[in-house]
Image (cartoon, rainbow, N blue to C red):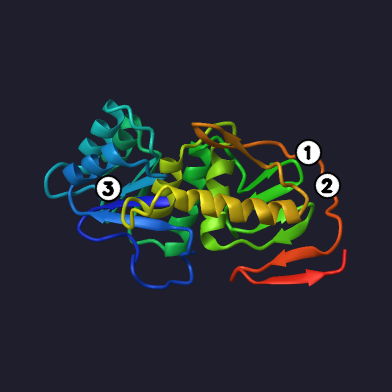
Amino acid sequence: MLVLHVGPKPFWPLNSVHPAIDRSVRSEHVTSGLEALELLRLYDYDIVLTRAELPDISGLDLIRRVRLAGKRAPMLLADHEVAGSDRIKALDLGADDVLTLPCELAEMLARVRAIVRRGQGHTRSVLHLGPVELSLDSHEVRVAGEPLHLSPREYAVLELLFLKKGVTLRKDAFLNHLYCGTEEPEMKTIDVIICRLRKKLAAAGVGQLIGTVWGCGYILRDPGPVRPVPGPVAAWGVDGGVSVAAA
């Protein structure tokens, strides 16, 4: 999940490990509304968190400009003091939620996850396709009830496919989701991650879950029932190690 923080400081620490923030949450921070507009022109964020008071334009004006530009990224306005009239105006302009600070980080993250789910057309935190289920809250993936252990980047790729189910995603969409333009790896990086992910899915009996649309990208497809895997079954760990159990 890509989060854009707009304001004098981010809404949570970006470079430190915090137990409430899982590794799949990636953030960018800018201090001004105009900087935010420029980034939103270049990248697709899952959600924008903005203060009401910014050094150049107001948070309300940022929301208005984002919606006038046709950007659909969910937006949450949060600050220490937000007048009742401004709360109503923010929602009318297109904000998805308004939050008064301070609040518990766990609550803010829960609100962010709920807004992102609704923005993608999902009302529940557990997404299903055939025998595969993916939990947006716990970041667990199960196939026919059995856990499938993925690396953080493998999970992030599968999460994006689930959130955009039915949409063919180009490689640059995955790069944006994974790196937000910071590391700028080569496009083939996505092919490598998809290849590893497909091997793990095939070992779990759902090798047809990720389809290729040649010349366009990748799409999530209903894999049908779990197909038994003959011979030893490889159990993949988060660190990439393999243990073999008797089938």
Give the residue pinned by disc 3.
82
Q: Is residue 7 left or right of residue 75?
A: left
Which one is closest to the eye, mark 1 or mark 3?
Answer: 1
Which one is closest to the eye, mark 2 or mark 3?
Answer: 2
The x and y percentages for residue 6 are: 26, 51
**12, 24: nearer the viewer:** 24
Q: Quadrant of residue 122?
A: top right
Does residue 44 appear in this view? Answer: yes
Q: Quadrant of residue 247?
A: bottom right
Amino acid type for the residue under numbered disc 3:
Val
The residues tagged by marks 2 and 3 sit, at their Cα atoms, a distance apart of 55 Å
Q: Which mark is residue 179?
A: none
Reading the chain from its start, which is encountered first: label 1 or label 3?
A: 3
Mark 2 closeness class: few <14, some 14–19, many ≥20 residues within 10 Å? some
Q: Which mark is residue 224?
A: 1
Amino acid type for the residue under numbered disc 2:
Arg
Give the residue pinned by disc 2.
227
Q: Is residue 161 left or right of residue 222?
A: left
Pointer 2 with pointer 1, Cβ within 8 A:
yes
Q: Residue at position x 42%, y 47% from top?
A: 187
Reading the chain from its start, which is encountered first: label 2 or label 3?
A: 3
The x and y percentages for residue 105 are: 42, 63
The residue positioned farthest toward the left in the image shown: 56
**243, 10: nearer the viewer:** 243
